[in-house]
Amino acid sequence: MSEILAGASAKRVCLAGATGTIGQATARALAARGYEVVSFLRRRPDRAAPEGARFVDFSDPASLAQDGFANERFDAVVSCMASRTGAPKDAWAIDHQAHVNLLEAAKQAGVQKFVQLSAICVQKPLLEFQRAKLAFEKALIESGLTYSIVRPTAFFKSLSGQIDRLRAGKPYLLLGDGALTACKPISDDDLGAYLAECLEDETRQNRILPIGGPGEAITPRQQGEELFRLLGLEPKFTRVPVAMMDVIIGVLRFLSPLSSRLADKAELARIGRYYATESMLWLNPETGRYDAEGTPSAGTETLFDFYAAVIAGGVAPDRGDHAVF
Ligand SMILES: NC(=O)c1ccc[n+]([C@@H]2O[C@H](COP(=O)([O-])OP(=O)(O)OC[C@H]3O[C@@H](n4cnc5c(N)ncnc54)[C@H](OP(=O)(O)O)[C@@H]3O)[C@@H](O)[C@H]2O)c1
């Protein structure tokens, strides 16, 4: 184990993924609770190191040790890092291998706690990025560190993609009848707070934690209806049959061997279908069914209040590369 320098703050946290949607919210939540946050970022041409941040190469264990932990004392790691595309190669490189490297370097540096942002969808793993996340969850559980694996439901940004369509007078797109699935969305700040509180709350330690936001589960049709109401428009829906998505996926898969770009597109189409047909709720292992009642809730912010704020012009959803989620 590396030599640990004495005299550092008692509550010093390494934050990975600090530039992402939930990472930014988690940085705010940690700072508000008095933690000293040191963000580990990848170097990018357009990026200067902000105060309190360090550039590391997550694919290189030596860089994590030297440029990141740097023989200093860290009490915990919180990771909100994730592949920005969800494409299989990137998912295995980031959601799995980069995290394995981070975990190993953290252990070497004497870190005691590790809080991992995962996703509720890994409970039914049909996609490569879900298998990559699960493989890291397993490594973390077996690591001997105190862990919290947080598996949230849907984020607000992922349920806000159609607002501009509706403003432009277009119909809301539904897969099937729009009631195939439901979710209990959680806000960025509520999830950031939940992650930060895992560091002190022993009931959240050495556990896998499915977590949604407050209130009842909401279907896509209810999301569309609320958006039309807030916009003062007559509701208009276009139903896309699931079979049509299957045809598109089939064609892309057939063409996949021709190029890795087409293979990635096929996987992204499969990801889209997954989210359009699987609920983001706790999956009851006894019944094999998604269970809204059994999905724990945290926080106070609701999706519909967020929609109202977006439509009033107060906030803009951070769509980013995860728009397909
Ligand atoms: N969207 C949803 O509804 C939903 C629901 C449940 C769970 N989740 C899960 O929540 C997680 C985080 O989501 P998010 O929306 O906050 O993610 P995000 O905004 O896409 O942020 C991803 C973060 O990971 C970092 N990152 C990506 N590739 C990297 C690399 N090669 N080296 C270093 N850092 C890298 C990014 O840094 P850069 O700025 O350098 O790119 C960024 O800080 C994901 O695991 C997702 O599966 C999402």
Image (spheres, rainbow, N blue to C red):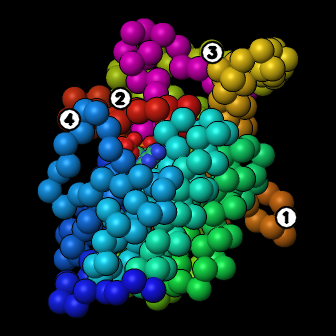
Q: Decide: few, some or many residues near mark 4? Use Cα within 10 Å; few <14, some 14-19, many ≥20.
A: few
What is the distance, in whole Å, between disc 3 and disc 1 at their CAs? 32 Å
Residue at the spot of label 2: 230
Q: Comparing marks 4 and 2, which lies closer to the viewer?
A: 4
What is the distance, in whole Å, between disc 1 and disc 4 at their CAs? 42 Å
Q: Amino acid at mark 2?
A: Leu
Q: Which of the two labelled residues, at mark 3 and mark 4, occupies the earlier sequence position?
A: 3
Query: Which residue: 21% across, 68% down?
Result: 31
The answer to whether residue 86 shows anywhere in this view is yes
Q: Position of residue 305 (x, y in %)?
A: 33, 44
In this rendering, is residue 146 above or below 221? below
In this rendering, would 317 be left or right of 58?
Answer: left
Mark 3 CB lies closer than 8 A to ligand 1: no
Q: Amino acid at mark 3?
A: Thr
Dots 1 and 4: beta carbons under 8 Å?
no
Question: Which residues make up the magenta segment?
Answer: 156-181
Q: Which of the two labelled residues, at mark 1 and mark 4, occupies the earlier sequence position?
A: 1
User: Is residue 259 covered in magenta?
Assistant: no
Q: Which of the two labelled residues, at mark 2 and mark 1, occupies the earlier sequence position?
A: 2
Query: Which residue: 20% across, 49% down?
Result: 49
Residue at the spot of label 3: 238
Q: Which of the two labelled residues, at mark 4 and mark 2, occupies the earlier sequence position?
A: 2
Q: Secondary structure at mark 4?
A: loop
Q: Residue furthest top?
A: 169
Dots 2 and 1: beta carbons under 8 Å?
no
Q: Secondary structure at mark 1?
A: loop
Residue at the spot of label 1: 287
Q: Amino acid at mark 4?
A: Gly
What is the distance, in whole Å, between disc 3 and disc 2 at their CAs? 19 Å
What is the distance, in whole Å, between disc 4 and disc 2 at their CAs? 14 Å
